[in-house]
Image (tube, rainbow, N blue to C red):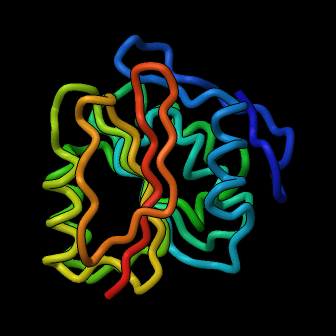
Amino acid sequence: MRVIAGKFKSRQLKSVDSKLTRPTTDKNKENLFNMIGPFFDGGVCLDLFGGSGGLGIEAISRGMDELYSVDKQYKAFATIKENIQTLKIQDAAHVYKMDYQKALQQFANQNIHFDLVFLDPPYGLKISQKILDFLVENCMLKKGCILVIEDLNEETIEIKEPFVLKKQQSYGITTLQIIVYEE
């Protein structure tokens, strides 16, 4: 696993040594960022189910200013921290070992607003809509915020206001939805 583009292009990242995470392949990561970017002019990124941290780190490499990466699994948390330390981006990246609900509440209390959000929850939880509702109700999204949701095909959510569906792509058993927050 590696960083695809930007200031950390070709740098190797560690993956999580656990069956509890699903790393995004380099090819899928490249396709994803070509759809949403591919580069950014600053901003704050949330990777709510961080895994190895690859998506959030890719966003930093491509121009995001700040990253909030969350994972409740210890191995994932440790891997994200290690990848961030290897790239020496500790000043731009905040890593949390906690449940997604606690993290969202903490960020809401801190009045943090996001420009880019990655939601790749564990399969079967059916929580993406609940997370979107929380982000909107707590005014955590900046106008034009891009949200990337990856979930099982049968758990694909219906996109409705204040979101606009920009792209939807199926990959085997999963669907990737790219939506934009329009106030």
**Residue 161 falls in image quadrant:** bottom left
- Left or right of 150? Residue 32 is right
**Residue 121 falls in image quadrant:** top left
- Left or right of 173? Residue 162 is left
Estimate the x, y position of residue 116 in percent, counting from the top left. Answer: 48, 66
Q: Quadrant of the C terminus?
A: bottom left
Estimate the x, y position of residue 8 in percent, counting from the top left. Answer: 81, 51
Of the pair 72 and 181, the residue shown nearer to us = 181
Estimate the x, y position of residue 15 in percent, counting from the top left. Answer: 58, 24
Identify which residue is drawn at 73% across, 58% down: 61
Instruction: Say whether residue 62 is visible.
Output: yes
Estimate the x, y position of residue 55 in percent, counting from the top left. Answer: 57, 46
Q: Is residue 65 above or below residue 31?
A: below
Of the pair 178 and 8, the residue shown nearer to us = 178
- Count the numbered circles shown: 0
Of the pair 155 and 98, the residue shown nearer to us = 155
Identify which residue is drawn at 70% across, 79% down: 41
Instruction: Say whether residue 95 is visible.
Output: no
- Left or right of 36? Residue 128 is left
Identify which residue is drawn at 86% across, 39% down: 10
Q: Quadrant of the N terminus?
A: top right
Q: Is residue 122 above or below residue 41?
A: above
